Amino acid sequence: MSNKILSGISVLIILLLIGFGFFMQQEDETVDTDLVEYEDTGIYLDTVNTIRVYAASEEEGKTAVDQVFERLQEIDRKLSIYDEDSEISAVNQQAGKESVEVSRKTYEILEDSIHYARELEGSFDPSIGALTLLWGWGSEEGPSVPDEEEVRETLDFVDYNKIEMQENNNQVSLAEEGMRLDLGAIAKGYASVEARQVLKDNNIDSAFVNLGGNITLMGMKPDETPWRIGIQHPRSDRGEVMAAVDVDEEELETSEAVVTSGDYERYFEEDGEEYHHIIDPETGYPTVHEIISTTIVTDDPIKADAYSTGVLVRGMDGLEFVEETENMEAVFISENLDVFATSGVRDRLELFDEEFEMVDMEEI
C-alpha cells in the first residue's frame, strides 16, 4: 500500500506564490504615493499567510504585520484541534463529561459556527473533529483511509445540535464522550477579521490579507486600480491561475472577502486513489461529486470561510444557498472545467484559460 501526501518544498513555493488558489495581479502602471509597501509571510493556522500593507513607512508597515502574526499565533493556540493545550482541545477532552469555560472570542466563533451550520443544513459542521482525527489529518503518521465500520461509528459523534452553549459564563460542552470540535473550516475567516482589526488599529487603510487562500481586502490600492484576485486552476500542479475577479472601490463595501475551497488543496494517495481533506459530515468520506472548487465573494470573511466549505460539500445544490443569500456571490468549477458564476460576479470574472467554459446559469 502506498501513502503519499502532497507536501514539500515545491508545494510551499506554490503556496507562497498563489496562496492556496489566489494571487494579486500586479498592474504595470504605478503612481506617486507617500505610502510604502511592506509584505511578509508566516506559517500559522497550519497554512501559509501573506500580509501586504501600504503604510507611512516601512517600519510602521513591519510593526503592523508583526502584530498580525502575533494575533494569528494567539488564535492558533486557542482554536487548534491538534494542540492539546488549546481551548478547543480542552472542550474536546471533557466531551460527555462537563462544560469548559472558554474565552469570549472563542465562544463567539463557536456561536458563529453553529449559526452557519444551521444555515447550511449541516454541510458545514464544527463538530466534525472526530472524523478529522479518524482520517489522521494533522497526525504525525499522516492521513490514511479508515475502516468503513469505524467511519460509520464515528458519524454518531458528528452533530452540531449536540454542542451546548451557556452564554452567561462562556461555557461550552459536548453532549457525548466521542464528540470533537474542529473549527478548521472557519478559523481562517475569524483570523482574517482579527487581522483586519489589528491593521486598522495601526492606521493601515490599504492592505491585502491572504490566510491560506482566505483573502480579505482593505481599501483601494494606492495607485487606485482595482484589486484583482486570481483563482487557481484546480487541476494544475504548477499553481496556474485560470481566472481573476476584479474588486473595485464601490464593491469593497460589500465584497471585501474572497475565499476558495477546493479538493486540490490538501490530499493524500493510498492504493492508487486520491483522498482530499474536505469531509462530508453526512457520509464521513471526502466529497465526491462534479464540483471541485468553490469561490465565495462577500463582505464577511467568517461567513465566506464557512460557506466555501459548506457549498463545496453540497456540490451544485450549493448554488441555491448562494443565490438565496443576501450580499454573496460565488464561482463554482466542475470536474470537466465548466465555470458557474452567480450574476453579481459574472461580469467581473475573466477567464484566462481556454480549457474552461462559462456556463449560462439559466441553463441549469
Image: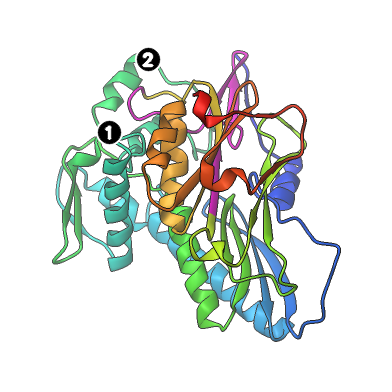
Q: Kindly identify which numbered label has been placed on residue 341.
A: none
Whether residue 41 appears in magenta in the rendering, the answer is no
The image shows residue 313, relative to residue 199, as above or below, that is: above
Q: Which residues are magenta?
A: 258-283
In percent of width and height, residue 277 lies at 50, 33
Kind of residue sitting beneath label 1 = Val
Q: Residue 362 location, x and y as percent?
A: 50, 28
Q: Is residue 306 left or right of residue 363?
A: left
Q: Secondary structure at mark 2?
A: helix
Image quadrant where residue 332 sits: top right
- Helix, strand or loop at label 1? It is loop
In magenta stretch: residue 264: yes
Q: Is residue 243 visible?
A: yes
Q: Residue at x 32, y 65 (%)?
A: 105
State the colouring used for the structure image: rainbow
What's the residue type where badge 2 is placed? Glu
Q: Position of residue 87 (x, y in %)?
A: 32, 57
* Residue 82 seen from this side: no
Residue at (56, 68) in percent of width and height: 69
From the top left corner, tell me how far across and down residue 132 is, in percent.
41, 35
297, above or below 360, in the image = below
* Residue located beneath label 1 in the image: 158
> In the rendering, which numbered label is found on residue 148?
2
Q: Nearer the viewer, residue 259 or 59?
A: 259
